[in-house]
Amino acid sequence: MKLASEAFFDKIKKQHKEQKPFVIYNKPNINKISGLLQLTNDVFYTEKYTKEGFVFVPFSNSEKSILIPRENSQAMECGHNFSNEEQQLDGVLLKKESLKEKKHMALVENAVSTIKQTALQKVVLSRTKEIELPTFNFILVFKKLVQKYPNAFCYVWYHPEIGLWLGATPEVLLVAEDRAFKTMALAGTQKYNGKMDVEWGDKEKTEQELVTESILENLKKICPKIEVSEVKTIKAGPLLHLKTDIRGKANTGNIGDIVACLHPTPAVCGLPTELAKDFILKEEGYNRAYYTGFLGELNFKEDTKKITSLFVNLRCMQYTEGKLIIYVGGGITKDSDAQLEWLETENKSRTMLDALLK
Ligand SMILES: C=C(O[C@H]1C=CC=C(C(=O)O)[C@@H]1O)C(=O)O
């Protein structure tokens, strides 16, 4: 159902007020906002990725994978011509985070020495940034995300039993049309300072190469011939990253088989995967929940095709109990500097903060 944007957002407000699950999202470089409004407040789970709907999957199995099934939802869409009358988000106050800074730096130092002494090569370490906010206008922030980050996947996802999440992620996990698929190796970060033609340090180049190599190795199991692009610099909001595009044709039509080769990529976990995951679960000291999981359209039937568009849940935040929790992390290798890694997480938090403060 195509709606004018006001009617679209009114329906979303009503759905939220009635505490019923929904997702609204804008895919990269497309001038269309889609919504799926679940008809009841049941929780639908998905394990094998064979159903049709919008999936919301955690980083590890501490949480469950949730589906908003297409057949139990109302689908709607609107364009980008929304009003800008509400500009300001009131009451956003940032506190100093000296304690968090010390903790994060100690965690990074611990990782660097573990990498030097064991088989661990890379681990992605993260933290949260919390903002007290008694009321939260998620529609206003969503509109800002869509306007500010046209090449990101922007979303608000809500389930009364799980929570409210928002984000603007630059990272594709998997886009598939029947058996043809694409993914990307995204890693390495620097601040965008007005130009795209920049130099990259060895740490960032190696970090991104490790991600590419590992994805290619894992995909061999389901794809004999893989196309790999050159490494490019891409802009993601206030940041630049290194990216390699990867394409192929899978020898399986089951999305679950492809996802099993990709998630969690070394861009959000590390290498070797199991060692990195153990390090994260043991040392990070908090629950990532759905941050660094993935989300998106699963097995959408369009004409005669089956389309899947999944994105890694980065540059995201959760609103809970009067608090916004922003999640940010970065890849640690033997060459990481703890202070610079802290600054990188600060820079990454700007993606969400700029939509709250500006
Ligand atoms: C883990 C995050 O970013 C990943 C994606 C791109 C670049 C990254 C990096 O340079 O460390 C991270 O691997 C995050 O934004 O929280």
Image: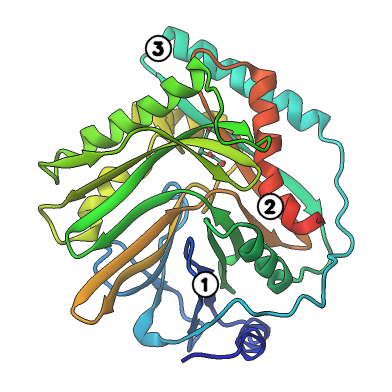
Q: How far across and how far down the image is residue 293, in percent?
A: 45, 51
Q: Is residue 202 left or right of residue 185?
A: right
Quadrant of the rendered structure where residue 140 is?
bottom right
Image quarter where the C terminus lies is bottom right
Quadrant of the rendered structure where residue 51 is?
bottom left
Disc 2 and disc 1 in contact, CB within 8 angstroms: no
**What amino acid is labelled 1 in the image?**
Asn
Q: How far across and how far down the image is residue 239, in percent?
A: 61, 39
Residue 97 higher or lower than 294, as above or below: above
**What amino acid is labelled 2 in the image?**
Met
> Residue, x 64% and y 83% (percent of image)?
9
**What amino acid is labelled 3 in the image?**
Thr
Residue 348 higher or lower than 23, as above or below: above
Residue picked out by circle 1: 31
Q: How far across and how far down the image is residue 35, in percent?
A: 51, 79
Residue picked out by circle 2: 352
Label 2: which secondary element: helix
Is residue 122 visible to us here? no
Label 1 near ligand 1 (CB < 8 Å): no
Is residue 9 visible to us here? yes
Estimate how packed mark 2 is, as few (under 14), some (14 to 19) or many (20 or more) residues with alpha carbons within 10 Å: many
Question: Residue 344's mark?
Answer: none
Q: Is residue 192 left or right of residue 224?
A: right
Dot 3 or dot 1, earlier in sequence: 1
> Residue, x 88% and y 51% (percent of image)?
93
Q: Label 3 to label 1, Cα distance in Å?
A: 48 Å
Dot 3 or dot 2, earlier in sequence: 3
Estimate how packed mark 1 is, as few (under 14), some (14 to 19) or many (20 or more) residues with alpha carbons within 10 Å: some
Of residues 332 and 344, the one nearer the viewer is 344
Q: Label 3 to label 2, Cα distance in Å?
A: 35 Å
